[in-house]
Image (cartoon, rainbow, N blue to C red):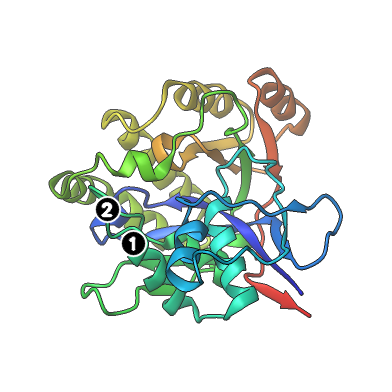
């Protein structure tokens, strides 16, 4: 049996989503896989006991039982940043019991009930399970399901390039540790400050309005910088890339904007060779040159 899911990037809405603001999250190739047989570059699966899948195993399976003989494949090669730990949970569940996305979302949230501060929203889990571009919003009641609307509209007219940054030594910010420091009052402040640009960006994406979406993306990036929610390396990367011809806006993604970068491209003015040169110079890697609709969870016998 083989199960696979895509990675993910937050286009808009990190931090504010924790207080109920919407977030726009995109599934991105290539895919993570978990299988009962070794394939391609897969390795025997070894999951940390405190990872989401490690906690899931303790709550769902006999803790003393050995893991099934599974094989894991990670296109990011362990660098993180595109939802590997969430992918492990989705895939393990798919191979064992195939929960619905909202059942698995509730499980994911319950695995973090003992966390201090803010547990993850689960927007990554929903997006990786369903695929495409998702407008996600936490429910008002704990026992309800989040809103997860498909938002594919802008993919045809808004050229989005995704750049990997987490492979740089010491750059990756552990999301679960970072969120332990986030208070409820801080979440509410971020929602108040970030939601206008998030809403404007989601509406622009639905219209396929490249310029308005670029403006919203830039406003979100600048907002993170003002709030101290952007590492210095990500700020320097943005400054270097946005100077290039045909690059309309650049924003980081993930905790402290450290995982990845999203760039809005104007194809008629874009110079791919110069773009690649700057990426290499800065130790970055082009992950996806043009974002398109990517399927979610797939399972085959």
Q: Residue furthest right?
A: 40
Instruction: Give the Cα separation between the discs numbered 1 and 2.
Output: 8 Å
Of the pair 275 and 300, the residue shown nearer to us: 300
Mark count: 2
Q: Is residue 110 above or below residue 180?
A: below
Q: Are marks 1 and 2 in contact (CB under 8 Å)?
A: yes
Point out residue 77 in the picture as x, y percentages from the top left corner: 70, 41
Location of the N terminus by quadrant is: bottom right
Residue highlighted by disc 1: 22
The percent coordinates of residue 95 (x first, y second) are 65, 74
User: Is 169 on the left-hand or right-hand side of 32?
Assistant: left
| Left or right relative to 218: residue 119 | left
Query: SS at mark 1?
Result: loop
Question: Which residue occupies 25% across, 39% down?
Answer: 181
Depth check, front residue: 56 or 274? 56
Residue 202 coordinates in the image, percent (x, y): 41, 60
- Label 2: which residue? 195
Image coordinates of residue 49 in percent, x first then y, are: 49, 52
Alpha-carbon neighbours of circle 1 within 10 Å: few (<14), some, or many (≥20)?
A: many
Towards the viewer: 262 or 179:
179
Q: Determine the secondary structure under disc 2.
A: helix
Residue at the outermost left position: 185
Residue in view at x 37 percent, y 72 percent: 106
- Residue displayed at 22% across by 45% down: 190
Seen as rendered, the residue at the extreme top is 281
Up-down relation of residue 10 to residue 156 (above or below): above
């Amino acid at each position: 049996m083989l199960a696979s899911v895509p990675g993910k990037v937050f286009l808009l809405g990190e931090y504010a989503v924790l207080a109920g603001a919407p977030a726009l999250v995109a599934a991105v190739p290539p895919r993570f896989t978990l299988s009962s047989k070794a394939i391609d570059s897969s390795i025997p699966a070894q999951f940390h006991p405190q990872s989401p899948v490690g906690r899931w195993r303790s709550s769902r399976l006999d803790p003393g039982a050995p893991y099934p003989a599974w094989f894991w494949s990670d296109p990011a090669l362990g660098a993180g940043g595109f939802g590997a730990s969430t992918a492990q949970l989705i895939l393990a569940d798919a191979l064992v019991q195939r929960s619905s996305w909202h059942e698995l979302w509730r499980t994911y949230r319950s695995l973090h009930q003992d966390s201090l501060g803010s547990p993850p929203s689960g927007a990554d889990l929903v997006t990786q399970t369903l695929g495409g571009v998702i407008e996600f919003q936490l429910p008002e009641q704990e026992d309800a399901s989040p809103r997860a609307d498909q938002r594919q509209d802008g993919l045809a007219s808004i050229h989005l390039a995704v750049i990997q940054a987490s492979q740089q030594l010491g750059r990756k910010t552990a999301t679960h540790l970072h969120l332990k420091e986030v208070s409820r009052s801080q979440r509410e402040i971020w929602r108040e400050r970030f939601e206008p640009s998030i809403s404007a960006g989601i509406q622009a994406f639905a219209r396929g309005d490249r310029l308005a979406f670029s403006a919203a993306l830039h406003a979100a990036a600048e907002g993170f910088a003002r709030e101290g929610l952007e590492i210095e390396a990500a700020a320097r990367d943005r400054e270097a890339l946005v100077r290039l011809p045909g690059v309309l806006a650049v924003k980081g993604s993930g905790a402290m904007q450290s995982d990845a970068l999203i760039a809005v491209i104007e194809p008629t003015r874009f110079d791919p060779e110069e773009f690649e040169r700057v990426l290499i110079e800065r130790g970055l890697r082009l992950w996806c040159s043009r974002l398109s609709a990517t399927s979610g969870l797939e399972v085959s016998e």
